Amino acid sequence: MVPDPDLQLQTVIKALRESVLPAIPPGEKVAHEQLHLAMATLGILRGHLPMTRRFLRGLSRDAIDLAEALSRLTASQALSGPRTALEAALADPALENQEIEAARSQLMESICALLESIEPDLAAQARRIVLEASALPIERQRAWFIGSGFESAPGNIRPIATLLEA
C-alpha cells in the first residue's frame, strides 16, 4: 500500500469507477446513485486534504475570537481554561488534527454553557456577538461542502482558499 493519502484516494476512486460501477446491474438505480455519491465524496475529500489543517485552525481561531468577545461582555473567566488549551493546541506543531478539534469542541461546549447561564440583561448583546462571530465560520463550512451539490446559491460563496486566508 502506498502511504500517500492523495494517491490512495485516487486509487480507490478509480477502482470504484472502473471495477465496481460496471458490476452494478443497470436496473439498480439506487446503487448507482449511492456509488456516484460515494465517489464524489471521496473526490471532495481528496481536494480538501491539503487544506484540512488550515480549515480546522481557522475554525479554532473563530472559536477563540468568540470566546474572547463573550468573556469581555460577561467578565467571566469560565472560558479562560478551554481557550488557553485551544491556543496551546494551535501552537503545538506536533498535535494531530483530531487533538486540535477536541480542544475546539471543548471550548465550544464551554461557550454553550456560558450562554445558557448568561444574565438576562446581557442576552441581546451576547446574541449579537454570536451572530457576528458565526458569519465567517458558516461561510467557511458552506464553501468546504460546496462540492456536495446541496448549496442553493454556490455563486454567492467565496472560494474556500480565500476564506481560509481570512
Image (cartoon, rainbow, N blue to C red):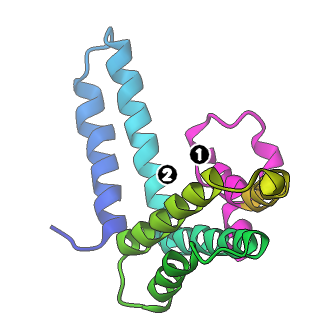
- Of the residues under marks 1 and 2, which one precedes in the sequence? 2
Residue at figure coordinates x 32%, y 20% from the top left: 31
What is the x, y in percent for residue 66?
69, 68
Q: Nearer the viewer, residue 140 or 32?
A: 140
Give the structural element (helix, strand or loop) at label 1.
Answer: helix
Residue at figure coordinates x 39%, y 41% from the top left: 39
* Residue type (three-letter) at the residue carrying disc 1: Gly
Label ID, residue 161: none
Numbered disc total: 2
Q: Nearer the viewer, residue 86 or 15?
A: 86
Vertical arrangement, residue 129 with respect to residue 56, above or below: above
Asked if the residue at tag 2 contacts the one at tag 1, i.e. Cβ–Cβ closer than 8 Å, the answer is yes
Residue 162 makes an appearance in the image: yes
Residue at figure coordinates x 25%, y 21% from the top left: 24
Q: Residues within 10 Å of mark 2 (few under 14, many from 20)?
A: some
In the image, 112: left or right of 72? left
Q: What range of the chain is rendered magenta?
A: 137-166
The residue carrying mark 2 is 44
Q: Nearer the viewer, residue 17 or 163?
A: 163
Vertical arrangement, residue 53 with respect to residue 159, above or below: below
Q: Quadrant of the N terminus?
A: bottom left
Q: Nearer the viewer, residue 10 or 63?
A: 63
Residue 158 makes an appearance in the image: no
What is the x, y in percent for residue 121?
83, 54
The residue carrying mark 1 is 147
Q: CA distance from mark 1 to mark 2?
A: 6 Å
* Quarter residue 98 falls in: bottom left
What is the x, y in percent for residue 163?
72, 66
